[in-house]
Amino acid sequence: MAHTNPHPDARSPVRPSSNRKPPRRNMKRLFQSDALTTLFGRNVGTLVTRIVLTVVVIGILGFIVAGLLRPGASSTTPSSSGATVGLQIGDVAPNFTITTLDGKQMSLSQFRGKPIMLNFWYSTCPGCLAEIPSMQRFYSAQQTAGKDFVILGVNSVDDAQTTQQFAQQYGLTYSLALDNNQQVATLYNLTATPTSYFIDRQGIIRSVVVGPVDASTLQQDVAEISQP
């Protein structure tokens, strides 16, 4: 005997699909402000990452600014002619204005077109005392021969009276100037005295001598910077 369904309209219960996603939970934001949330992120991980990146960027910018403000930063400054102003051989020597023994202002740039020996010295410097006599003899010989060679002695230690007495005692006839507050010494990153820069007619550094300059070196370096 066939069985009949006592509930012909009843439907089988619907099983939940395995593909249904669980209900999404609302994550609590760190900031109520939309602007702060956009800037710092919605969670702690994003916030920490962005803070670290910000600190790194600030640190890099700080190194760049420190390099630009460091004395001698002019070593990366282009001159009006397009050459690099700096302290390395092949660079244009940094310009400066300084006070002579008679109180006048003198700039390095006013000697452009002439070979220049820029010499840092002071009266009680042992190396200076060793090189000055031969420097004066060589300079006098150049003047007698009608040469336009220039020696500019920059004194960053002594006062005007001490420098003047020294010049008279040693019979110095080349240009001497006082580096008040050691501005020129700082500009040239002076680390030892004497130090000499040999600068050609175009204002380009061709040689740098740290320590006393002997007669043969002086003659050779001046010959190089005296070329047309």
Image (cartoon, grey):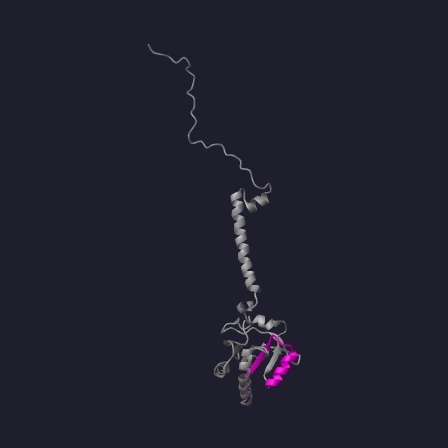
Residue 203 screen position, x and y as percent: 54, 77
Q: Residue at x 61, y 71 (%)?
A: 183
Please tell me whether residue 153 belongs to the stretch shown in magenta: yes
Give the farthest residue toward the top.
1
Residue 97 screen position, x and y as percent: 62, 75
Q: Residue at x 65, y 78 (%)?
A: 160
Q: Nearer the viewer, residue 26 or 3?
A: 26
Q: Residue at x 61, y 83 (%)?
A: 167
In the rendered structure, which segment of residues is drawn in magenta? Answer: 146-170
Quarter occupied by the N terminus: top left
Give the farthest residue toward the left.
1
Where 123 sits versus 8, above or below? below
Residue 84 screen position, x and y as percent: 52, 71
Where 69 sits versus 210, above or below? above
Q: How many marks?
A: 0
Where 31 sits versus 203, above or below? above
Left/right placement of residue 100 relative to residue 18 reads: right
Q: Residue at x 54, y 88 (%)?
A: 141
Q: Nearer the viewer, residue 140 or 193?
A: 193
